[in-house]
Amino acid sequence: MSHKLTKRQAAPTRRPRLALAVTLCALACSAVLTGPTAHAQANPALLGDKTAFIDDLLRQMTLEEKIGQLRLISIGPEMPAKKLAEELAAGRVGGTFNSVTRPENRPLQDGAMRSRLKIPMFFAYDVIHGHRTTFPIGLGLASSWDMDVVARAMRVSAEEAAADSIDMTFAPMVDISRDPRWGRTSEGFGEDPYLVSRIAEVSVRALQGDTKPIAANRVMASVKHFALYGAVEGGRDYNVVNMDPQRMYNDYLPPYRAAIDAGAGAVMVALNSINGAPATSNTWLLQDLLRRDWGFKGLTVSDHGAITELVNHGVAQNDSEAARLSMKAGTDMSMADQVYIKQLPELVRSGKVSQQELDNAVRDILGAKYDLGLFKDPYVRIGRAADDPPDVYADSRLHRRDAREVAQQSMVLLENRNAALPLKKNARIALVGPLADSHIDMLGSWSAAGKDKQTITLRQGLQAALGGQGKLVYARGANITEDKHIVDYLNFLNWDDPEVVQDKRSPKAMIDEAVKAARHADVIVAAVGESRGMSHESSSRTSLSLPQSQLDLLKALKATGKPLVLVLMNGRPLDLNWARENASAILETWYTGTEGGNAIADILFGDVNPSGKLPITFPRSVGQIPSYYNHPRVGRPYTEGKPGNYTSQYFDEPNGPLYPFGYGLSYTEFKLSEVSLSQPSMSADGKVEASVTVKNVGRRAGATVVQLYLRDVAASVVRPVKELKDFRKVMLQPGEEKQVQFSIDRKALSFYNAKLEYVAEPGEFQVQIGLDSKEVKTASFNLQ
Ligand code: NOJ
């Protein structure tokens, strides 16, 4: 896939759609059909029996109709309306993505209803962290460590998407990421198999609901990117993945598995290769593991153009071979390329792809449509034209309260010296920074149908919170970067409507203005970080630094001697060495979404006490990557405070992360008791209860996350130094204490051994409980 195609594809929401809808309607508008499809009407008894219904339909399908079902096309300039109408009527399209309103999709479904067998299409879209309402990005949702918060964001996203006629989302994205150079780190939920698995499961349930067929106000989840996409070598997007099986099974595969066990209807296959075999043509991955071992019975969708890319990977000579390999591996649907539709007729006729293989793929697609309730009613989410929202962008369609409350939970307080935060509402505040008033950047990447103008920027949020009190002076202070090459890169998908707009003044003029504002203020709030395009698909970086323009600004502000509060907006861990030394406070907000500015203000003024915890390690430098907390043990471990010679460390920098996994401050303080265990040993199928008491020893109400880690002291293979196994978010009034009890069972002790057997090995286990992954209280027990 060309680079350009990827980027255009990656920002589908900013393209005008009305023209397409109008043209299509002119071509295809017919009376809205409601109720079961013709095939379903003719076979009412069959409709209740999924397998029988699909088999019966399959028997009636021609080769061309079957192959048509495998085609998932992107609505856009590549597929003009006239052509699309013809393709639909000929039964040559299984589903589309990127058309996101009922008036757009109704004529498309009308087209499918005019085809010979009237097989409904489905409409998919990248609803990753919100639809019309934008919630915090994945890293932000994960920072809440609160499954109700995640579920709320996903449920609202599903409801909004379904109300816009979307049937399927390409989410959740559960790729474990331990390399922040990778731009897509922002989309996922961090580095930890357990936390990401919990989020995967909760997300799938919230998106799909718990009914079969999936209800009209829910969408099918398509978990991605299967598999291991987050482990691309060097954090460079689309690069290869090489990984030993134990690491795969123990660390990287569990979140996909959790999503599938929670009932995800679909799986998106990753773009990368795994140990030399591209995922798209990887029979081991898609047949042996996914279908045979995990029992997956749903739909597999290729990623954008991935089938034809098998030629670039060098495993297929040409498109024909690419189509054959991916069909044999079990990639059911081909996204946005012509390979199946062009190559399969000949491949099937010549027997290179068997009828059985083709039928298996078609069955999965029809099965997904069945589970979406589309055979009962192809218009189940499209509804009647009379009920269409008069204005899809109407503010009344947004869920602002949900967005604000979810965002409040998604931020992590990294520093707070001399109680610089919370701010006083009568303070004079100098608000500076290129992200302080940037609507588009509040959205973060993959913002679906979110509209930048509907976001609340930090400037707006602070102004509203101050009411008539205090004073807010705004000065931009710096551009995101002065590097023209980077600005051009970030803007190349939208030259006519650039996302990164440069202030034409000189850097010095901007800094001078900001410094002047700071001199007249009690406190400086600086919104710095990355523009949203910097943490995106195809946005890998070699550096984690703040761009020089922003660092120069911060240094000048620091020189004023005024308290400097950093509000970070970014989609990956950044190198915060300077900030850590020099800022009075640092609030990591990631990208907070539609209500971001209000939610950040709620935290800055202390109306809400921050309670987020990092779902990913912040390394000190790029050189430390990968810097995940659950590293396998080594023969010569480095011990803090001891001389480091001949231990596993870097001699030119302090060891360990800048901010560890699980870390985050509050405006109050918490104390943890020692760990007490219910018994010193555990029988093979028994349990050990581990408890601690957590107390709010500060003066404000607040929540913290009590985290349970385990270490397998001696095992048959090298095991991690610790692994998260459970957590509990606890709200405490000042002076209040609560006992938190974790039940440790055999599953918590189990792992995949050298033979990939899932085992719990007898011996000692160390329990570690803390409010982050580093500072922990310990106790031990034996598994008999
Ligand atoms: C490519 C991306 O890798 C994938 O995550 C996304 O769902 C598809 N494009 C569709 O937009």
Image: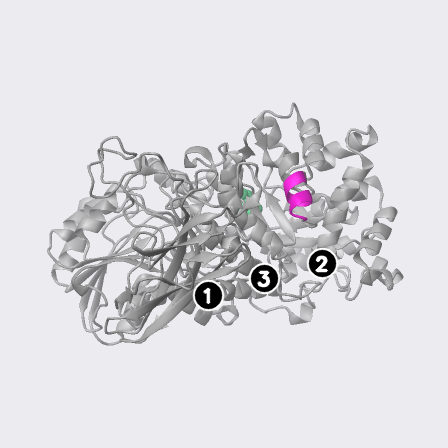
The amino acid sitting under disc 2 is Asp
Q: Which residues are the magenta region?
A: 288-295
Q: Quadrant of ligand 1?
A: top right
Horizontal and vertical percent position of residue 469: 22, 75
| Quarter containing the N terminus | top right
N-terminal of the pair, mark 1 or mark 3, is: 1
- Is residue 731 placed above or below 439 in the rendered structure? below
To which residue does mark 3 refer?
Answer: 205
Horizontal and vertical percent position of residue 699: 23, 74
Marks 1/3: CA distance? 13 Å
Q: Is mark 1 within 8 Å of ligand 1?
A: no
Residue density around tag 3, few if under 14, some if 14–19, many if 20 or more, within 10 Å: many
Is there CB contact under 8 Å for labels 2 and 1? Answer: no
Marks 2/3: CA distance? 14 Å
Closer to the camera in the image, 309 or 295: 295
The mark found on residue 593 in the picture is none
- Residue 128 visible in image: no
To which residue does mark 1 refer?
Answer: 149
N-terminal of the pair, mark 2 or mark 3, is: 3
How is the rendered protein coloured?
A: one colour
Q: Report the mark closest to the observer, 2 or 3.
A: 3
Horizontal and vertical percent position of residue 200: 53, 55
Describe the element under mark 2 as helix, strand or loop. Answer: helix
Q: Residue at x 35, y 35 (%)?
A: 542
To which residue does mark 2 refer?
Answer: 371
- Let me know if residue 291 is in the magenta part: yes
Q: Quadrant of residue 465?
A: bottom left
The tally of labels here is: 3
Residue density around tag 1, few if under 14, some if 14–19, many if 20 or more, within 10 Å: many
Q: Residue at x 65, y 71 (%)?
A: 387
